[in-house]
Image (cartoon, rainbow, N blue to C red):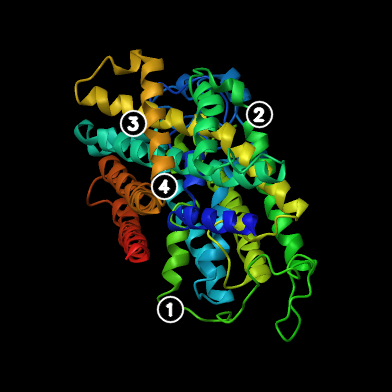
Amino acid sequence: NGSVNNNMNASKRTQVISSAASVASFTRGGTITIDTARNYPNQQHQGPVDAPSSSSSAGSIQRGGGGKAADASDEKKGASMAASTFNLVNNVAGAGILTLAAGKASGTGWIPSVAIVASLGWAASTTFRMIAKACDLTGENDFKGIWSKTLGDDTKFLVDCAIMFQCFASTVVYSGILGDVWTPIFKIAGLPDSINMRKSNIVALATLVLYPLSLIKDLSALAFTSILGFSAVAYTVLFIVIRSMDGTYALNALGEPIGKFVADGTIALPSFAKSTLWNLDFTSLVLMSSLGLAFIAHYNAPTFYRGMDKPTIPRFGKMVKTSYAILVVTYCLAMCSGYATFGDVCKGNILLNYHASDILAQLARVSTGFSIMFGFPLVFRGARLAFTSVADTLGFKDLGKHHRALVTALMVVITSIAITVEDVSLIVGLSGATMGSLLVYILPPIMWTKAVKMAHGADSVEYKKERLNLAFIPLGLFIAGMGVFMTLKSKA
C-alpha cells in the first residue's frame, strides 16, 4: 500500500508532464545555436549541441554558402542520410511519449487520436524545413542568425528569453521527475522510509550527481547519453507495447481482473468507459496540449542542415519527412498501447500505472531515470547560456565568467523550486504552451516568408506563394491558447 501511495503522490506531481507533454523532448533540441556552443557531438536530452556529425562543426561552415560545404574535406565529414535521420529522431523523441496515453484518456477516440498526432507531426516537419530553407536563402548558420537577418538585431534577445524560460522550466521538471522515479526504486532496494523521501532524494541527487555534472564545461564527456537516451526510449516503447498484448494487466468480459499484476488490487484497475472509435470534442484539446512540444527540435534545424553530407533542400526535406514519420509511428504506438492497457485511468506518467513488482516496468523506470539524470546537465547548460546571454543584453557582461558561482546559484533555485512546489505544472504548462508554439508554429513561417520577401521582393510570385505558410501562425496561437487554457482549467 505504501508503494501505491507513493505512486499516487508521484502521479499528482508528474501531471507536469501532461500539461507540457514533451518538455523533455524539447530539452534535446531546444538550444543548439547559442553562440558559445561548440565542439561536442549531438547529444540526447540536449541543450546546446553541434552538428549531427561529431566530426563536423557548425562554426566551420562559411556564411553565404547556401548549404554547400566549405571545402572537399568538410563535405566528407557531413552526416549521411541515415545518420541524420537517426540523430533527428533521437533529438526529438523523449519522455513526452510517457504522457500521450493520458492525453488520449481524456476522451478522444482512437481514430481522431492518431489523426491528431499525425497532423501535428506533419505541421512540425513543415515548419522545421522552413527554417532550413531560410538558412539556405539567407546564408546564416543558426536560428538567431536567421532571426537577426530577417527581423533585425534589436529583438533577437527574445529568442534567448524563450530558450531560457523553457530550459529553466525543464530543469525543474527533470529534478521533480528524478525524485518521482528514484523514490519507489530506492524503496524496492530496501532504503528505509525515514530517509527515502522525494524531497530528500531530490536534494541528494542534486548535490551528489546533478551539481557536479552541471559544472562540466566540455560536455563531450556525456556523449554516451545519446545512446543511453535512445535506448531508454526504444525499450520503454517496446515494453509498453508488450504489456498491452501479454494480458498481465487484463480484465475479463465482466470487467474483473484476471492479469497477474491487477489481481491483487494494489493498482488502479483499467477502465474503458470513455473508449470510442470516433469521438472528437472539447476534451481532445488535452491531447493537443500534450503534443505541444512533442515534435520540437526546430532550434537545431540549421545545424542539421549544415551538418548533412551534400546538403540540399530536397535531400534535407526527405530526411526530415522520414524522421517525423518515424516519430509519428512511435508516438502512436506508445499512446495506443498505453491506453489499450489501462484505458481511462492512464496517469500523466504512464510508468506510474504499472505494478511495483513488474520487473520490466522497473527496468523502464531505471533506464528513464538514468537517461534524465545524465541529460540534466545538457538541459542546464542551455538554461545557463541563455541566461548569461540575456544578462549580457541587460548590461551584466561579466556574469558568464563566474562559472561555479553561477552554476551554484541556479542549482539552488532549481532544487528549491523542485522540492517546495508540490505541482509545478502551472509554470511548465504555460511556458510549454507559449514557448513551444512560438518556436514551432509561429517564428519559422514568419522568418521564412520574410526571407523570401527580402530575396525576391514583395510582388514576386515566390513571396505570394510562400505567404500562405503564415496560416501556421493561427494554428500556433490556437495551440498556445488552448494549452494555457487547459493548464489554468486544471488548476481551477
Q: Nearer the viewer, residue 74 or 433?
A: 433
Which residue bears the numbered disc 2?
A: 224
**Distance of label 4 from label 3 (alpha carbons):** 14 Å
* Badge 4 density bin: few <14, some 14–19, many ≥20, Cα 10 Å: many
From the top left corner, tell me how far across and down residue 38 is, in percent. 48, 21
Residue 380 lies, with reference to residue 21, above or below; the image says above
Which residue bears the numbered disc 4?
A: 130
Contact check, label 4 and label 3, Cβ < 8 Å: no
**Distance of label 1 from label 4 (alpha carbons):** 31 Å
Describe residue 393's horizontal placement relative to residue 298 as left or right. left
Quadrant of the frame with the N terminus: bottom right
Looking at the rendered structure, the secondary structure element under dot 3 is helix
Q: Earlier in the sequence, mark 1 or mark 2?
A: 2
Which residue bears the numbered disc 3?
A: 145
Going by the numbered disc 3, the residue's amino acid type is Gly
Going by the numbered disc 2, the residue's amino acid type is Phe
Residue 211 lies, with reference to residue 90, above or below; the image says above
Describe residue 334's horizontal placement relative to residue 20 as left or right. right
**Distance of label 2 from label 4 (alpha carbons):** 31 Å
Residue 26 in view: yes
- Which numbered disc, 1 or 4, marks the residue closer to the eye? 1
Name the residue rendered at 54%, 71% in the picture: 105
